[in-house]
Image (cartoon, rainbow, N blue to C red):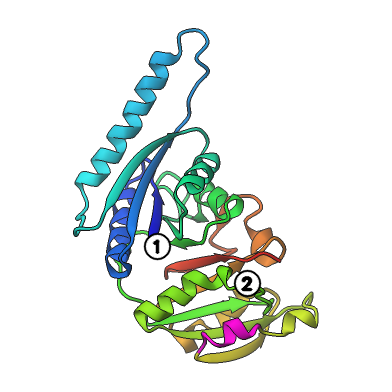
Amino acid sequence: MKNILVPIGASESAVNTLQYAIDFAKEVDANVYVISVFQEFSRVGGMSKVNTLLKEESENQIATVLKKVDHKEVSVIAHPIKGEIVDGVTRFNNHVPVDLMILSPRSNSVREEVYLGRTSGKLVKDTNIPILVVPEGATFSIPKTILMAFKNGKFSSKKGLEPLRKMIGLFDVTLHLLHVETPEQTEAMKKVSGKLEKLSTSYKQSENATTYQGVLEHFQSFQPDMICVVRRKRGFFKKLWEKNVVMKNEFFTTKPLLILRVQD
């Protein structure tokens, strides 16, 4: 895990999220890349000056955040990037392969009942990068127990599990698997990949309407430091994040949320 990406906006949570990423990077010996995306206007009609001002504003925004964090001798590299957020992150990932993206769940401007705001939701939905969603105000601590909830036990590639494998190896994490059997589950989904079984300490099956309900039912018994879910092309979490914004009554956790990207 060498490259961690932290997109920041104008919200007050940007400083906390970046500090969490730096503290995390310190433990895994990774670089931290900080980006602030600004929308560039057409250069027709003398808009070049406006674009210059927008870039400067983005640079100043990053600089303000960087002054408020402790770098802890971690390599922190800042880039203002023009364009739309998903396109900007995708282009950056093409030049600098990102192993993990760390996000705050929402900006301070959205409603209290929202868990995942529009920008974070778009990045979860439309990028192929593993994501760690950091609770507002959280400080980094090494996770000792991770609860991974899923309904499809098929993991054909090691790549999708790589962030989880790295954390287990570096932090000596105990991984508990929660295999949630839902009404639409097929027989193939009930089989668990050997790649995942090798990483785990325990395995439990549960019958619930959704994966999230399975997490709610068994959260107290596991008392995890982190929750891990899977974002596939199809399935519960794909449907959950179709609309970008996720309400707290649909999904919510006060623990860091690791979202793996797995191809079906």
| Distance CA(mark 2)–CA(mark 1) | 29 Å
Q: Position of residue 68 (x, y in %)?
A: 20, 48
Residue 226: quadrant of the picture: bottom left
- Identify the mark nearer the N-term, 2 or 1: 1
Name the disc covering residue 135, or none.
1
In the image, which is nearer the foreground, mark 2 or mark 1? 2
Q: Position of residue 165 (x, y in %)?
A: 47, 76
Decide: few, some or many residues near mark 1? Use Cα within 10 Å; few <14, some 14-19, many ≥20: many
> Which of the image's four quarters has the N terminus?
bottom left
Depth check: 93 or 53 in front?
A: 93
Q: Position of residue 16 (x, y in %)?
A: 30, 55
Q: Position of residue 250 (x, y in %)?
A: 60, 63
Decide: few, some or many residues near mark 2? Use Cα within 10 Å; few <14, some 14-19, many ≥20: few
> Which of the image's four quarters has the C terminus?
bottom right
**Tag 1 secondary structure:** loop
Q: What range is drawn magenta here?
A: 193-200
Tell me, yes or no, if residue 22 can be seen here. yes
User: Tag count in the figure?
Assistant: 2
**Tag 2 secondary structure:** loop
Residue type at mark 2: give it: Ser
Q: Which residue ends up furthest to the top in the rendered image?
A: 45
Give the answer, above or below, for where 134 lies relative to 186: above
- Asked if residue 129 lies left or right of residue 156, the reply is left
Residue 28: quadrant of the picture: bottom left
